Image (cartoon, rainbow, N blue to C red):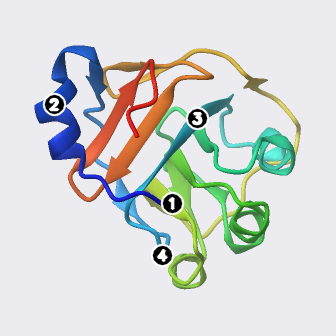
Amino acid sequence: MKTFKTADLCDDHSEQLQICSTVFQSYGKRTRFYGKIETVKVLEDNVLVLEAIESVAPGSVLVVDGEGSRQCALMGDRLAGIAASRGLSGVIIHGCVRDSGALAVLDLGILAVGTHPLKSKKEGKGERDTLLNFGGVTWRPGEYVYADRDGVVISKDPLL
């Protein structure tokens, strides 16, 4: 994975970047990751999250809009393990994760707003490959996201 800093990307490309205002915590072993955006929108149901993890291209970043819910986790060690084994670059969740100790050793970028021990529903409700809006930015499938300890930025075009 190429080395970059979101601060440097902002210095060099601020006019073409969206900067996410959501404060995420890092749960995966990778604290710096980037890739093409794939999207899922769900509320307290992770069936579509698993479907996306099993089908998106390696190197992608799955962005999950869980509406910021803190009522359950949308990903735990099983789904994160699948994501890591399939070569995803990272997963960004506007919601919670669980099994945080196990997530910390996976070679995967994992950002979420918090943790919650309860698993999600399994009803299959939600949307895939749709525009998402949270954190003051629009997440478009096919655009690029770059994340590190300083924050998360989005670009229409690849920067690395």
Residue 99 shows in the view: yes
Please name whichever residue, 122 or 85, is drawn nearer the observer in this view of the structure: 85
Q: Secondary structure at mark 2?
A: helix
Q: Please name which of the two marks, 4 or 3, marks the residue nearer to the observer.
A: 3
Q: Amino acid at mark 4?
A: Lys
- Of circles 2 and 3, the one toward us is 2
User: What amino acid type should be assigned to the residue bearing mark 3?
Assistant: Lys
Q: For mark 1, what is the residue?
A: 110
Q: Are marks 1 and 4 in contact (CB under 8 Å)?
A: no
Q: Based on the displayed image, in which of its 4 quarters is residue 8 positioned?
A: top left
| Mark found first going from the N terminus, 2 or 1 | 2
* Callout 2 amino acid: Asp
Q: Secondary structure at mark 4?
A: loop
Q: What is the CA distance from the residue labelled 4 to the residue labelled 3?
A: 19 Å
Mark 4, residue position: 29
The first of marks 3 and 1 along the sequence is 3
Which quadrant is the C terminus positioned in?
A: top left
* Residue 76, position as x, y percentages in the image: 67, 67
Q: Helix or strand or loop: what does disc 1 sit on?
A: strand
Does 136 appear above or below 152? above
Q: Is residue 15 left or right of residue 4?
A: left
Kind of residue sitting beneath label 1: Ile
Name the residue: 19% across, 15% down: 15
Q: Which residue is mark 3?
A: 36
- Is mark 3 in CB contact (under 8 Å) with mark 1? no
Above or below — where is 122 with respect to 41? below
Structural distance between the alpha carbons of marks 2 and 1:
25 Å
Residue 45 picture location, percent across and down? 75, 43
Residue 65 in sight from this viewpoint: no
Disc number for residue 12: 2
